[in-house]
Image (tube, rainbow, N blue to C red):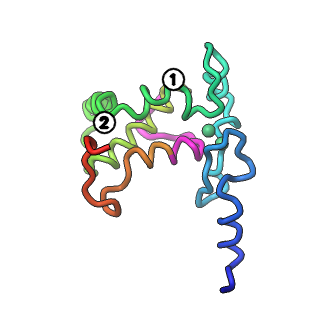
């Protein structure tokens, strides 16, 4: 079987070369292949305090801020009150809210839309936590 150049590249480079945190994945565009260690605001958080996180996703704050379903729900209520309802599936909404929470955590300021490029590791971790219900089928949060 002959592999296409793209398939070879994908199999060789599970982790993009630019990544120094170990958790980034290849994203569709170069702009999105950003590593958390390339962003000053993020490395500031990683170096402050006594954590030894190699990646922002391994920082104890990341789980509390971006992956806690209840916290995301409350954050969404606040968003809804300010900007109105988003007509989306629950996980899509959870992901979007998680991205917003991440921006608020690192940049403090937040408008209606997420306008900064988020590191690949952050996007992938949030996507894994709240997968699209379309292709995963029904998945109960209590089952894992
Ligand atoms: Zn990385
Ligand atoms: Zn990272």
Residue furthest out toward the bottom: 1
- Left or right, 33 with respect to 83, comes to right
In the image, residue 59 sits, relative to residue 16, either above or below, namely above
In the image, residue 119 sits, relative to residue 107, either above or below, namely below
**Residues in magenta, as a range:** 110-124
Q: Main secondary structure of the magenta part?
A: loop
**Residue 126 part of the magenta-drawn span:** no
Quadrant hosting ligand 2: top right
Q: Residue at x 38, y 52 (%)?
A: 131
- Left or right, 128 with respect to 70, comes to right
Front in this rendered view, residue 71 or 80: 71
- Left or right, 136 with respect to 138, comes to right
Residue 87 location, x and y as percent?
A: 25, 50
Residue 119 location, x and y as percent?
A: 59, 42
User: What secondary structure is marked by label 1?
Assistant: loop
Disc number lying in front (1 or 2): 1
Front in this rendered view, residue 76 or 129: 129
Q: Quadrant of residue 121?
A: top right
User: What secondary structure is marked by label 2?
Assistant: helix
Task: Classify the position of the N terminus by image quarter.
Answer: bottom right
In the image, residue 107 sits, relative to residue 136, either above or below, namely above
Disc 2 marks which residue?
83
Cβ(mark 1) to ligand 2 < 8 Å?
no
Disc 1 marks which residue?
108
Q: Residue at x 67, y 72 (%)?
A: 6
Front in this rendered view, residue 114 or 23: 23
Q: Residue at x 45, y 30 (%)?
A: 63
Q: Residue at x 75, y 51 (%)?
A: 17
Task: Classify the position of the C terminus by image quarter.
Answer: top left
Residue furthest out toward the top: 49
| Disc 2 packing (10 Å; few <14; some 14–19; many ≥20) | few
């Amino acid at each position: 079987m002959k592999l296409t150049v793209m398939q070879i590249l994908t199999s060789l480079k599970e982790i993009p070369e630019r990544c120094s945190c170990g958790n980034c994945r290849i994203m569709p565009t170069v702009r999105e292949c950003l590593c958390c260690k390339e962003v000053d605001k993020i490395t500031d958080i990683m170096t402050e305090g006594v954590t030894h996180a190699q990646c922002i996703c391994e920082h104890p704050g990341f789980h509390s801020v971006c992956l806690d379903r209840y916290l995301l729900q409350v954050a969404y209520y606040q968003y809804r009150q300010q900007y109105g309802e988003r007509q989306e599936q629950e996980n899509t909404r959870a992901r979007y809210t998680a991205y917003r929470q991440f921006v608020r955590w690192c940049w403090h300021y937040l408008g209606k839309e997420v306008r900064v490029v988020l590191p690949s590791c952050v996007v992938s971790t949030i996507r894994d936590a709240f997968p699209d219900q379309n292709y995963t089928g029904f998945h109960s949060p209590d089952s894992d």
